[in-house]
Amino acid sequence: MLYDCRSLADRDRGIAAAVEAVKSGELVVLPTDTVYGIGADAFTPYAVKALLDAKGRGRQMPPPVLVGSRHTLDGLVFSLPKNARELADAFWPGALTIVVEHAPSLQWDLGDTGGTVAVRMPLHPVALEVLRETGPMAVSSANKTGQPPATTAQEAQDQLDYSVRVYLEAGPCPDPVPSTIVDVTGDQPRVLRDGAIPFEKLREVVPDLIPAGG
């Protein structure tokens, strides 16, 4: 079912339907500040598997996790590095994904993560409203692997069809550039992927940041 969140009534119905779907272990497509994402409850292993299956992707490429609050990050890690806290304070909500070591006690299975998780808080009102009700969601770009990322919910539906229960349409992505990914699990923070937030801006916050490929 596709809901047009540009209409206030449809938006309320759509967000309620998306929250119910996620809590039932089903898949949803939602807008973010980069591209549209396909999401599932991060703590429901069969839902995460369904997400990977819908994309045609294996466990070796675990999805990132989106959160609706900066403070949620503290609950996902055993100990949050100072660099991660500074980056989140400076750039969240926004197009920065931070790779951290997740707490060993977490009851989830995102795939072959090696004990790490990529976390982001998106700057999009619809996504944040859903995430604040569902809690952390495993979210990947809403497309089949090898196909272009969807910049509208309709484009996502054309690719993913009935594998997704609820599609939330909010119009075309204004700036469909992927998020920048920074890994803070090593001795020095390192850019894994250049993206929407320039390296120079990140380095203003974390001076010892290593560039991608560096």
Image: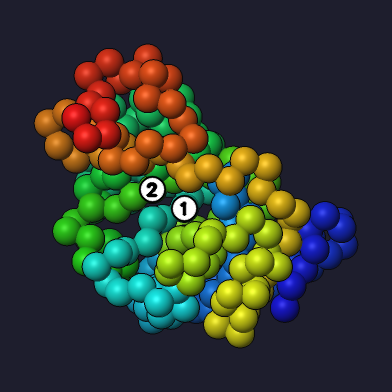
Q: Nearer the viewer, residue 150 or 31?
A: 150
Task: Name the side, left or right, on which 57 lies relative to 188.
Answer: right
At numbered mark 1, what does the secondary structure look like: helix, strand or loop?
strand
Disc 1 packing (10 Å; few <14; some 14–19; many ≥20): many
Q: Nearer the viewer, residue 100 or 210?
A: 210
Q: Nearer the viewer, residue 151 or 87?
A: 151
Cβ–Cβ below 8 Å for labels 2 and 1? Answer: yes
Q: Is residue 4 above or below residue 35?
A: below
Mark pair 2, 1: CA separation: 6 Å
The image position of residue 211, as x and y in percent, is 26, 28
At a point 74% along the width and 55% down the height, the residue shown is 170
The image position of residue 3, as x and y in percent, is 77, 68
In the rendered structure, which amino acid carries the disc numbered 2?
Val
The image position of residue 165, as x and y in percent, is 62, 79
In the rendered structure, which amino acid carries the disc numbered 1?
Leu
Q: Is residue 51 visible?
A: no
Q: Which mark is residue 5?
A: none
Q: Is residue 43 above or below residue 81?
A: below
Task: Name the side, left or right, on which 49 lies relative to 147.
Answer: left
Q: Which mark is residue 119?
A: 2
Residue at mark 1 = 66
Quarter of the figure with residue 113: bottom left
Could you tell me which quadrant the C terminus lies in? top left
Quarter of the figure with residue 153: bottom right
Q: Is residue 141 above or below residue 194?
A: below
At a point 27% along the width and 16% down the height, the residue shown is 207
